[in-house]
Image: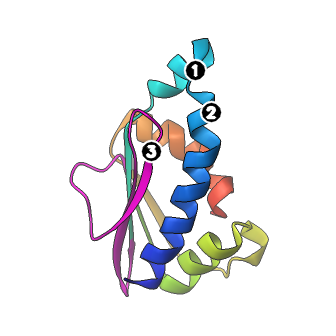
Amino acid sequence: MSCIEGLLESVAKDVEGQLRPQLTGFFGGMIRGYLPQTWVFETEEGTASLTVDREGRALAAAGALPTPDVTITTSHAKLSAALRTRSKAAVPPGPLTVTPHTEKGRMAFGFLRSRLGL
């Protein structure tokens, strides 16, 4: 397991814990419209993915899962600091390329970016 995959597992647990209770009622229906989501994270040390299904279950995986909604490419140092601290203030400067592949991915990333420290 890579460092990034391990950090994404922690993020997945938090996302699932926050998201699943929100998936009921009218507001839950709106959120479900953005699910499922798959994000691919690429660094010079490897690639890992985070996916959230329609029921709010989140999973981290090694490698790039097919048909991502967003691909994030950055340095290992920047991504690991962001995922570990989830605070933009603690993230070193450096390149960050965010490529939305779907409109729902673009919208979700805009909403969740700060929660990932990016």
Asked if residue 83 lies left or right of residue 5, the reply is right
Tell me the residue at 62%/30% (across/down): 22
Label at residue 21? 2
CB-based contact (under 8 Å), mark 2 and mark 3: no
Q: Quadrant of residue 13?
A: bottom right
Disc 1 and disc 3: Cα gap in Å?
14 Å
Q: Position of residue 27 (x, y in %)?
A: 61, 18
Label at residue 89? none
Q: Residues within 10 Å of mark 3 (few under 14, many from 20)?
A: some
Considering the image in quadrants, where does the N terminus appear? bottom left
Q: Position of residue 15 (x, y in %)?
A: 58, 50
Callout 1: helix, strand or loop? loop
Residue, disc 3: 57
Q: Quadrant of residue 87?
A: bottom right
**Nearest the eye: 81 or 7:** 7
Tell me the residue at 46%/26% (across/down): 32
User: Any magenta on residue 78?
Assistant: no
Looking at the image, tell me whether mark 1 or mark 3 is earlier in sequence order.
1
Disc 1 and disc 2: Cα gap in Å?
7 Å
Disc 2 and disc 3: Cα gap in Å?
11 Å
Residue, disc 1: 24
Q: Position of residue 19 (x, y in %)?
A: 59, 39
Q: Which portion, as a residue range, is magenta?
A: 42-70
